[in-house]
Amino acid sequence: MPSAPAYTRLSVDKRRRLLIDTGSELFARHAFEEISMREIASAAGVSKGLLYHYFPSKTALFTAAVAEYAAELAQLLQPDVTDPPIEQLARTLERYLSWIEEHSGTWTKLMQSAGSVPEARAITESFRAQTLQSVLARLSPNAEPAPVLRNALRGWLGYIDAAIVDWVTHRDLSRDQLRDSLTAAFVASVDSAQRLDPDVRVALAERTA
């Protein structure tokens, strides 16, 4: 009988995914500056030359990892538009927090390191901008949102990041408690916008479709 091959040749997409996953695991345990391409290649079981074939630099690999996670989250954050906005939000937050709970170490390190990598920071900022636009479109579907509403919700998105970092660091709140806290903060942000600008009218309990 012929002996089994020493390794299985992977497709381009599977190999790329393996390298991204391996890099993400290392980035989750160490700061971006502490990891070398040689260490990533060794952990993935490939030559450094092959790693460079897929990713010309550590920055390119790190940016690809951030982009993969952002795309995965974007899919999770798609709401059921037949639900009232506040129910859409609560269910979306539940999916988001469940994902982060499963990938807490990776998420925290990637977010921390992204600040020092301009290419990755651009992806996270684009993700936030798209999330904001999606929320605004459901709250103000027929017109450009009022500046006070846009500003309030942009602040709320920043608050989410800070609250989640605290949550995964201290682990003294349940996921349900955090979800309810973020939902309440959202309602308060919308309420503050309506108080500042009487023309802002958002019915959070009504269906949008």
Image (cartoon, rainbow, N blue to C red):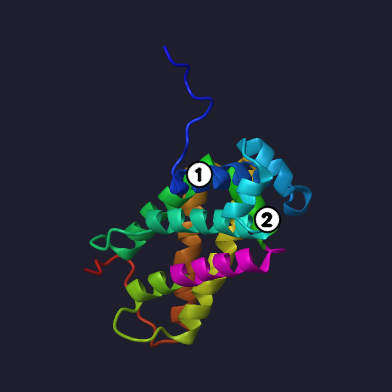
Q: Amino acid at mark 2?
A: Lys
In the rendered image, the residue lying farthest to the front is 2
Quadrant into which the N terminus falls: top left
Q: Residue furthest top?
A: 1
Question: Dot 2: few (<14), some (14–19), or many (≥20) neighbours within 10 Å?
Answer: some
Q: Is residue 58 left or right of residue 82?
A: right
- Can the viewer see residue 14? yes
Q: Nearer the viewer, residue 52 or 192?
A: 52
The segment highlighted magenta reads 115-131
Q: Element under label 2?
A: helix
Say if 106 sits above or below 199 in the image: above
Q: Position of residue 32 (x, y in %)?
A: 72, 53
Disc number placed over residue 15 in the picture, else none: 1
SS for tag 1?
helix
The residue beneath circle 2 is: 58
**Residue farthest toward the right in the current orientation of the protein:** 34
